[in-house]
Image (tube, grey):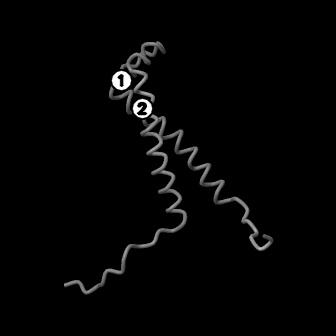
Amino acid sequence: MVSEEYRGARKWSRNKQAVATVIWISFLAASVATMLFFAMFDPTELMATLNVDIDIGRQGGYALGFFFFWLISGGCSAVTAWLVRTAPKRDTSNR
């Protein structure tokens, strides 16, 4: 029998919290961007328009589009998190 007590959830470090936040926010943004983009454009028609000889199908086009949007929004979220963390501290004593 194990006699250890549950001590609650482990606290994440500040870096782990930042990474998890960036991944989650960029995932949500990529999901919305994918839905909006592919509501207007069909991936198979886009491939035909671009004269690309790759036949990936509609599902593959949706997947590539989602990962593209996730990469772009992840980069934007990461830069935002970095700017917030490296911003100089405000001196509130002068107010």
Tell me the tag on residue 44: none
- Per the image, label 2 sits on a secondary structure element best described as helix
Asked where in the image residue 92 lies, by quadrant, the reply is bottom right
Q: Secondary structure at mark 1?
A: loop
Find residue 62 and report its horizontal and vertical position in percent. 38, 30
Q: What's under tag 1, amino acid-wise?
A: Ile
- Residue lying at 56% horizontally and 48% vertically, measured from the top left: 77
Q: Position of residue 94 (x, y in %)?
A: 80, 71
Residue 93's place in the image compared with 17, above or below, is below
Instruction: Indicate the position of residue 29 as horizontal and vertical percent values.
Output: 47, 42
Badge 1, how many Cα within 10 Å: few under 14, some, many 20+? Answer: some
Q: Splitting the image into 4 quarters, where does residue 45 fall?
A: top left
Residue in view at x 63 percent, y 54 percent: 82
Q: Position of residue 64 (x, y in %)?
A: 42, 31
- Callout 2 touching callout 1 (CB < 8 Å): yes
- Inspect the image, locate mark 2, and give the three-letter code of the amino acid beneath it: Leu
Q: Which residue is mark 1?
A: 56
| x 64%, y 60%: residue | 85
Query: Sequence-wise, which precedes: disc 2 or disc 1?
Result: 1
Q: Residue at x 48, y 49 (%)?
A: 25
Rendering quarter of residue 31:
top left
Above or below, comparing residue 63 to residue 87 in the picture: above
Residue located beneath label 2 in the image = 64
Q: Residue furthest left?
A: 1
Q: Quadrant of the C terminus?
A: bottom right
